[in-house]
Amino acid sequence: MQTFSPYIFFIFFATQKNSNQGKIMSLSFNADYFIDITAEVCPMTFVKTKLRIEAMKPGEVLEIRLKGAEPLMNVPRSLKELGHQILSFLPEAAETAGGTHRLLVRKA
């Protein structure tokens, strides 16, 4: 199974915006839960994410709002290593790396 870094997802989706009148394309998923970890720093970003996802049922979807270079790289990677499915990973707006992003993940 091939893995991709969060920045590859960012680059892919950011390049797609030109084909949709300036809007970044995204997949449509309804999240069962939402957490905002933008005020947290590593390692608390993943600790809070892991606690939330451990309380969920398999197949449920969590939306995570995050920012900062370390969380943007480490949270999706760690979730994927635990076997969860990354559904979407997009910036909230056309921002530079390290800006606020939304991550959708399905619990394994």
Image: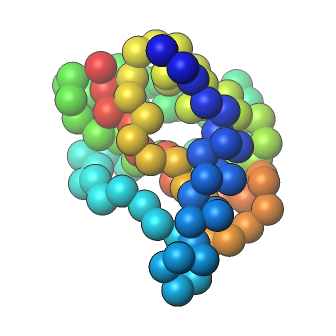
* 100 up-or-down from 7: above or below: below
Residue 57 position in % (x across, y down)? 20, 25
* 96 up-or-down from 44: above or below: below
Q: Which of 87 and 1 is in front in this view?
A: 1
Residue 43 in view: yes
Residue 11 position in % (x across, y down)? 68, 53
Residue 76 position in % (x across, y down)? 56, 32
Q: Nearer the viewer, residue 24 or 54?
A: 24
| Left or right: 37, with 103 as reference point | right
- Specify the farthest residue to the front: 19
| Left or right: 59, with 19 as reference point | left
- Specify the farthest residue to the bottom: 21
Q: Nearer the viewer, residue 47 or 18?
A: 18
Which quarter of the figure has residue 84? top left
Residue at the image position 79 percent from the left and 62 percent from the top: 96
Residue at the image position 64 percent from the left and 64 percent from the top: 15
Instruction: Give the number of marks.
Output: 0
Residue 61 position in % (x across, y down)? 29, 40
Residue at the image position 29 percent from the left and 20 percent from the top: 108
Residue at the image position 43 percent from the left and 35 percent from the top: 86
User: How are the residues colored?
Assistant: rainbow
